[in-house]
Amino acid sequence: MPRINLLPWRAAERKLRQQQFAVAAVAAVGAALMVAFLLYLLVGSWIDGQREKNQLLNTEIAALDKQIKEIESLEDQKRRLLARREIIETLQRSRPEVVHLFDELVRTMPDGVYLTSIKQTNRRLELKGIAQSSTRVSEFMRQIDKSPWLTDPELEVVEVKRDSAQGSEFTLYANQVGVELPGERSGDSGK
């Protein structure tokens, strides 16, 4: 049988496979690098797109914050105007009270009682005057208690002047009944 040496052919075949493997490996590494570069570009474009969206959202949020501040400012102005309107309406309703108060003071004052000063603090009245006797002051207090415009008479002092022929000086407190003014609470006696 003839002897054929196959060694050079196998070596050539092995060398060819090594060259093909090297080319395939380089191609695979090149393809992997290309895919990695494309993924890098794709992810970078997604990140840039998201940054643009975030910037747009931040711009819109800033615009909305500005509008919210304007709305809050307008609501605050509205509250102030409504409070002012309420005060004006209350004052308009309370305008005739002064007339009723003076009219009621005249009606409740018995003969022999004269007022020298009237001082009002909120709804609290301080009445100073001169009476012919203590019974006249008592009658004045009873009349104030019956009055629809005055309430809670409270006598502070009755001072009898010995040298005076006029009678006794007195200081009396009473509360005015009427429209509640802004800033006053129900039941506030003005003390």
Image (tube, helix red, strand yellow):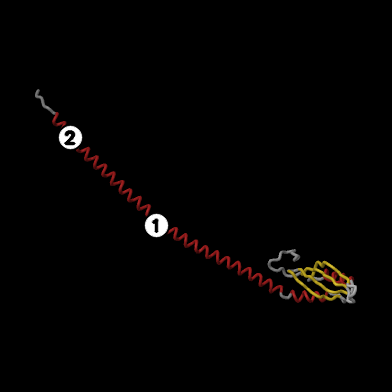
- Taking depth in this image into account, of 120 and 31 the one nearest to the observer is 120
Q: Say which residue appears at 10% left-offset and 24% top-offset.
A: 3
Query: Dividing the image into 4 quarters, which one contains the C terminus?
Result: bottom right
Q: Amino acid at mark 1?
A: Glu
**Residue found at x 18% / y 33%:** 14
**Element under disc 1:** helix
Residue 165, image quadrant: bottom right
Q: Which residue is mark 2?
A: 15
Q: Position of residue 171 (x, y in %)?
A: 82, 70
60 left or right, relative to 32: right
**Amino acid type shown at disc 2:** Lys
Q: Position of residue 62 (x, y in %)?
A: 47, 61
Residue 157 quadrant: bottom right
Quarter of the rendering containing residue 22: top left
Q: Position of residue 67 (x, y in %)?
A: 50, 64
Residue 52: numbered disc: 1
Judge whether 158 appears above or below 24 on screen: below
Mark 1 Cα-neighbour bin, 10 Å: few <14, some 14–19, many ≥20: few
Q: CA distance from mark 2 to mark 1?
A: 55 Å
Query: Looking at the image, is 138 positioned above or below residue 18?
Result: below
Q: Are marks 2 and 1 in contact (CB under 8 Å)?
A: no
**Residue with the most extreme left position:** 2
Instruction: Judge by depth and name the residue closer to the eye, 4 or 160.
Output: 160
Mark earlier in primary sequence (2, 1): 2
Left/right placement of residue 174 relative to residue 39 reads: right
Q: Quadrant of the N terminus?
A: top left
User: What residue is drawn where x is 79% and y is 74%?
Assistant: 117
Secondary structure state at the residue bearing disc 2: helix
Query: What x and y, as percent, mark residue 152?
Result: 81, 66
